Image (cartoon, rainbow, N blue to C red):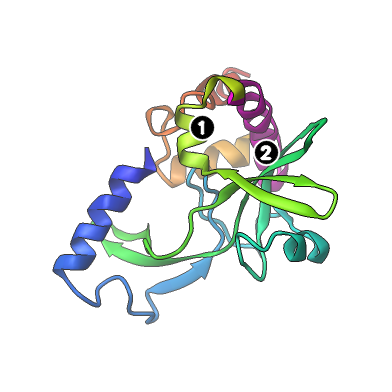
Amino acid sequence: MRGAGCWLFLLVTFLLPGFAFSQDSSSANQPFDPVMGLFFKTSQIAFERAPANLVSACTNPARSMFWIYARAKRPEGAYMVIAGPVWTVQDTDPPGKAVLDPVDSYGDVILVHGTKCRVVGDPDSMFNAPKPEQVSIVNDLAADLVNRAVRAYGGEANFLAALKAQEITSQKLDPVLRPLIARLTQK
């Protein structure tokens, strides 16, 4: 879902060199939920920041920090959706809308067991079209993701308002998230 916009952005970046990579006052290094596509400010929104021991265990992705957006425990370990901050630039159409810089990672789904950490996939493909053996894991991650987002935004109304403000409609969400968000809107 987010992939098409990224390819368009890559095309624009290629055709207009320097457009996306200038780090002037219109660009920012900010957290980005890699599943729903929500940008947020850490001074206002409280997603869980990964503790130092988890960051050091996860040599891939090699980040100095990241946030945990979802977690699902299994006998083989804990699956997590994680992402670090990404560079964004302000688009001109519509003015002020943030656009991802395609150089940075959009997050990973990892499996942590003890002090071992490995990447098992990317959120976009796992949430859009999980493999049969991933379905129950993705369902659990999706439920936890929505619960964490509701807590991070201070309640259902604030979370739904953030989705609306950033123009994240049901059609833009991954299929596994749609019924979970629909339940929130029906309350």
Identify the magenta region: 134-155
- Of labels 1 and 2, earlier in sequence is 1
The residue nearer to you, when weighing 181 against 156, is: 181
Where in the figure is residue 11, as x and y percent of width and height? 19, 58
Q: Quadrant of the C terminus?
A: top right
Question: Label 1: which residue?
Answer: 127
Q: Report the magenta stretch's main SS.
A: helix
Where in the figure is residue 139, as x and y percent of width and height? 63, 24
**Dot 1 amino acid type:** Phe
Query: Along the horizontal axis of the image, is 62 left or right of 36?
Result: right
Query: Is the residue marked by circle 1 packed among few (<14), some (14-19), or many (20+) residues within 10 Å?
Result: many
Tell me the residue at 66%/50% (across/down): 118
Query: Is the residue marked by circle 2 packed among few (<14), some (14-19), or many (20+) residues within 10 Å?
Result: some
The residue nearer to you, when weighing 166 against 20, is: 20
Residue 137 in the image: above or below residue 99: above
- Local SS, label 2: helix
**Dot 2 amino acid type:** Val
